[in-house]
Image (cartoon, rainbow, N blue to C red):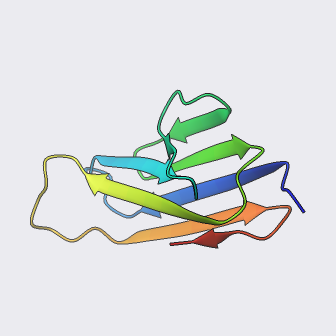
Amino acid sequence: RTAREALFAASWTQTDAEIEFSLAAPSGRSYGPGSPGTLHFQGSTHAYYRVALPEAGSWRLQLTRKGGGAESVWVTTAAMANGTITIL
């Protein structure tokens, strides 16, 4: 069964950590802010993508700290859909 939409979310504890969040679909297609078929929101400690008609299969979430930094950043991720999804 194909999901009508999926939500991929991430949150982190450090308000000063600038995090870039992107997605890769099972086909390898990359999703970033402004990608067609998506709604993206990013705050100081969280971000999400809502993807319309997501591909079936395993999705990859990529979070990168801008400018690097030696301090660890704790991140929590979640995914929701009205079908089966897998996060790698």
Single out the residue that lies furthest toward the front: 27
Up-down relation of residue 29 to residue 33 (above or below): below
Up-down relation of residue 16 to residue 42 (above or below): below
Could you say which is closer to the camera, residue 40 or residue 59?
A: 59
Q: Residue at x 52, y 45 (%)?
A: 29
Image mark count: 0
Q: Is residue 55 left or right of residue 14?
A: right
Could you say which is closer to the camera, residue 58 or residue 8?
A: 58
Q: Residue at x 85, y 48 (%)?
A: 4
Up-down relation of residue 66 to residue 37 (above or below): below
Could you say which is closer to the camera, residue 87 or residue 50?
A: 87
Up-down relation of residue 68 to residue 36 (above or below): below
Q: Residue 36 in the image: x percent, y percent?
A: 62, 28
Q: Residue at x 9, y 66 (%)?
A: 70
Q: Residue at x 68, y 32 (%)?
A: 37
Q: Is residue 48 left or right of residue 33?
A: right
Single out the residue that lies furthest toward the left: 70
Q: Residue 17 in the image: x percent, y percent?
A: 26, 52
Position of the N terminus by quadrant: bottom right
Q: Residue 83 in the image: x percent, y percent?
A: 84, 65
Q: Is residue 29 left or right of residue 73?
A: right
